[in-house]
Image (spheres, rainbow, N blue to C red):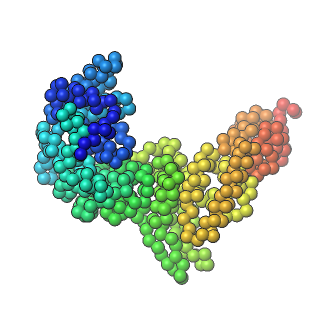
Amino acid sequence: MNLKEKLTHPVFSLIEKVADRNRHQVYAVGGFVRDLLLNRPCADVDCVVMGNGIELGRELCEEIEKKQGSKPDLHEFGQFGTCKFEFEGLEIEFVGARRETYTPGSRKPTVEAGTIEEDQWRRDFSINALALSLNKATFGDLTDPFNGIEDLQNQTIRSHRDPDQSFEEDPLRMLRAIRFASQLFFDIEPETFDAIIRNKEHIRSLSAERITEELNKIILSPKPSYGFKLLDAAEILPVIFPELCTLKGVETRNKKSHKDNFEHTLEVLDHVAYANGNLWLRWAALLHDIAKPKTKRFEEPRGWTFHGHEFIGGKMVPGIFRRFKLPMDENMRFVKKMVELHLRPIILAEDIVTDSAVRRLLFEAGEDIDSLMALAKADITSKNREKVLRYRNNFVIVERKLKELEEKDRIRNFQPPVSGNDIMEYYGLAPCAEIGIIKTRIKDAILDGEIENDRQQAWALMLKTGEELGLSCPKKS
Ligand code: CTP
């Protein structure tokens, strides 16, 4: 097979020229070739050189300078024999072909110069072990010693060598197998899958950062539930995410059952993914019911209840983020807020939708109101069509009211029209409880629609409340 038609980026003809002139043998390998065959966009190219990768990188950058007048920034990593630079939207990395030998019990391989085939052999899966020649005589020729093309056609992730050995060498490969399956919607070949189950405990030796990078890629895949079901079937889920496992199962008492919260959570996550939700909204979907097992009670006549699971769930978010070494910043606070508020739109939609309730929701969600509505919609997974229709209709009413009230009252970025400072200055007060009482009274009046979000009306209410509290303006007396 020859893929020269697909090698349209200008860097490839430059590599061809320099490599032939200086007699380097060079191949594009790994993910770039896989993605080229799958017509997936790929922004980085790994090139394997028979010989010195850094030397070819330097020569290529000089050639680019001769042609274009400016030289790309070449980053060299001498101890690994690699270098990389960016050119016209692609990141290009060069490395010498390697043979890796492992001594049993050690994860550190002995690395020596090798042939292209040895370099392909040491890679994780057959679909990642394809090589594409970049030299003139064979430009675009594909080298596929382990039937990677066939696996791509059969949509299969397969370790082309002993998977136990491969996973022992680098346990991350087990998560990568599931991540690729989830991103590409591929199967994992049975022997490879069985080896994952056998080697799952090795996952514990990986750093949280490496696990999280793969987990985020699963979460970002088109149908993330598939990846999570594979993690579960491979018995990896209890190792990396025990809280999700406790969501599994259905309990029945007095003929009353609750839903399987694991299945429900994955359905909500898929809904958010179909609606193109970003990574953090997907995390919020994954964690929205995380405290259900902790809050589960059986009460007659209602049956199963999960009172307060949204607040307890919100409290669990920072701990889970810390464990996965996810950022403890505004993204974590966003996820926490989404978990805490996720029931609010549906509670609102269950009742008569009043202006006051919609204003309060808008006030609490602020700028994140659209994300919260998206999560709440995704959370409707009932099999009862009538119920689903009722919720959907009410959501339309909530959304219309949100828009109307936002235009009128600007609650989304609520700034009190009379500030604490205004109150202190007018009454000549030092910080005290009365200031809070007046501020809350004004805020509630705006949210309940008693007054508009307007300084004059708020000022009048301040005067009235001040009088009720026995305050007077010192300047007047
Ligand atoms: N590789 C490997 N074992 C690993 C990681 C990587 O054998 N644990 C090899 C594979 O051949 C892989 C290549 O190194 O294709 C490049 O790895 P990387 O850039 O991490 O992944 P990609 O396959 O390019 O996929 P993606 O960019 O989606 O992460």
Q: Nearer the viewer, residue 236 or 119?
A: 119
Residue 320 drawn above or below residue 475: below
Residue 78 can be seen, yes or no: no
Q: How many marks?
A: 0
Residue 38 can be seen, yes or no: yes
Which residue appears at 34% of the width and 17% of the height?
69
Instruction: Determine the image quadrant of residue 304.
Output: bottom right
Instruction: Determine the image quadrant of residue 189.
Output: bottom left
The x, y position of residue 223, in whole percent, is 43, 56
Which residue appears at 24% of the width and 45% of the height?
1
Q: Nearer the viewer, residue 403 or 443?
A: 403
Tell me if 394 is positioned left or right of 215 in this view: right
Q: Nearer the viewer, residue 160 or 457?
A: 160
Tell me if 460 is positioned left or right of 263 in this view: right
The x, y position of residue 445, in whole percent, is 77, 49
Which residue appears at 25% of the width and 29% of the height?
15
The x, y position of residue 137, in whole percent, is 18, 34
Which residue appears at 72% of the width and 40% of the height?
416
The x, y position of residue 46, in whole percent, is 27, 38
